[in-house]
Image (cartoon, helix red, strand yellow):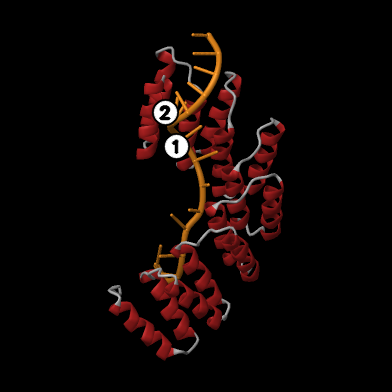
Amino acid sequence: SDAFLVLILCYSKMGNVDMAVETFGKMREFNCEPDVYAYNAILYVMVQKQLFLLALGVYNQMLKFNCSPNLATYSILIDGLCKTGQIEDALQLFDEMTERGISPNNITYTIVLSGLCHAKRFYDAQSLLNKMSSNGCDPDTITYNAVLAGFCKLDRIDEALMLLSSFEGRGYALELNSYSCLIDCLFRAGRFDEANKWFCKLIRDNISPDLVLYTIMIRGFCQAKRVEDALKLFRQMTDRGVIPD
RNA sequence: CGCCGAACAGUGGACA
């Protein structure tokens, strides 16, 4: 049974649904009842390949065979719904899960938060974030990344900045990607000085900007008609060994 | 057979 699981996981990582499904089917032939991990593995591939209806079928089969879904099962399914834009169904499944007595953890919350952001449901995301903390789940760095990027893209920059300060207050540091995202959004909102301020902070913190961030900066300064600043950055970039594309 | 552990799920940047 473990052997099957490992095999399914391998196919799953290779993105080979057909072989994963075939292997899964063979389990029964060998008198191995799939356990929750096997189900999760197979659900995961299906969801990755957007075969959501198939996944739902497997989920129902799972219930029929009295294999109780666990938190990972729901995370996989909810994630699939979110990523195919079916946020309402995702929320419903989320409720179904809690009704079954399974409480969400960091991962589940992050999935739903990111789904809500992608669905442009800022207020729902905000209140879920609060609910998360009041349920004793502390957002971790992945949660913050997801929500920060989400808020930025919804042009809720001030909310993102507030989030960032509570984030820093808890001793986390942003990664380069997230800074880039924030800076880009500041530029788009016409908040050039702030964008520049964050960039300077990055340098002070000894984080090396990469090609993408330099591109964001240069583009931003060009839009702000600060061509000299843009050129200065271009030089800084090449001096630091970042090659323009 | 029971217990314990392990193995499954989350974010991600400009232009394109």
Q: Residue at x 58, y 50 (%)?
A: A85
Q: CA distance from mark 1 to mark 2?
A: 9 Å
Left or right: A228, with A189 as reference point: left
Task: Give the x, y percent position of residue A225.
Answer: 47, 89
The residue wearing badge 1 is: A45
Q: In the image, residue A240 lies at what x, y percent?
A: 30, 75
Instruction: Name which of mark 1 and mark 2 comes first in the sequence.
Output: 2
- Is the C terminus of chain A in the top left, top right, bottom left or bottom right quadrant? bottom left
Residue lying at 42% horizontally and 24% vertically, measured from the top left: A24
**Which of the pair B3/A180 is nearer the observer?**
B3
Q: Is residue A84 visible?
A: no
**Three-letter residue code for mark 2:** Val
Q: Position of residue A13 (x, y in %)?
A: 37, 38
Q: Which residue is mark 2?
A: A21
- The crowd level at tag 1 (other Cα within 10 Å; few <14, some 14-19, many 20+) is many
Q: Quadrant of the N terminus of chain A?
A: top left
Q: Nearer the viewer, residue A129 or A116?
A: A129
Q: Are marks 1 and 2 in contact (CB under 8 Å)?
A: yes
The disc at residue A5 is none
Query: Amino acid type of disc 1?
Result: Val
Residue at x-position 70% and y-position 39%: A95
